[in-house]
Amino acid sequence: MDDHSYMAMALALAREAEDTGEVPVGAVVVLHDRVIGRGRNSPIERSDPTAHAEILALREASAAIGNYRLEGATLYVTLEPCVMCAGALVTARIHRLVFGARDLRFGGVRSKFQLADSELLNHRLSIEEGVLGAECAELMQKFFGSRR
């Protein structure tokens, strides 16, 4: 499988989040060509402000391998991670981040801050953006457009 295939999985999870009234963000963690973690935004459903797609995917991935360090793993997420999630990616030692659309208001890796590859930290991620970016951005625009 390739980046587009894994991002398509993340998009499917984002649509699941949307179906439950959550902001449509989905995430998938891949290690050695195997999906080891999945998550979709769920802070409303779980009454948990940390229940972002990335955090839930990291939790599942860590449980799958029995280690909080996910060295060599790639995280695919439909929306640029916020600062909380970017910090978690650094802590988990994620090797590579692939995201679809930028988050111009809260983005923690490109739009507002550059936390995930900051030279101030002890770990830096390789970052690629724009994979299925148009689809990811359209999903967000439609979601928020329907609430205005």
Image (cartoon, helix red, strand yellow):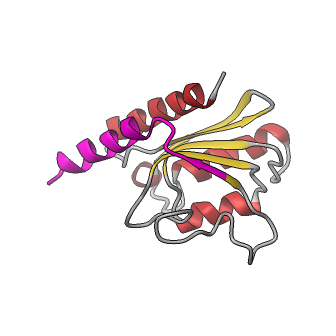
Residue nearest the viewer, comparing 49 with 8: 8
Instruction: Place residue 114 in its image quadrant.
Output: bottom right
Residue 37 in the figure: left or right of residue 67 = left
Q: Furthest residue to the top?
A: 1
Counting the numbered discs, the total is 0
Q: Position of residue 35 (x, y in %)?
A: 69, 30
Residue nearest the viewer, comparing 47 with 53: 53
Residue 113 in the figure: left or right of residue 18 = right
Q: Is residue 64 above or below residue 5?
A: below
Identify which residue is drawn at 43% across, 41% down: 133
Q: Position of residue 27 (x, y in %)?
A: 56, 41
Q: Furthest residue to the bottom?
A: 120
Residue 11 in the figure: left or right of residue 71 = left
Instruction: Place residue 29 in its image quadrant.
Output: top right
Look at the image and say whether residue 143 sits in the magenta stretch. yes
Q: Position of residue 94 (x, y in %)?
A: 74, 51
Q: Is residue 36 above or below residue 94?
A: above
Identify which residue is drawn at 78% across, 37% down: 64
Identify which residue is drawn at 68% across, 64% down: 117
Identify which residue is drawn at 77% across, 46% down: 62
Q: Where does the magenta region start and end? A: 127-148
Residue nearest the viewer, comparing 28 with 17: 28
**Which quarter of the rendered picture does the C terminus lie within?**
bottom left
**Which quarter of the rendered picture does the N terminus lie within?**
top right
Q: Position of residue 82 (x, y in %)?
A: 51, 63
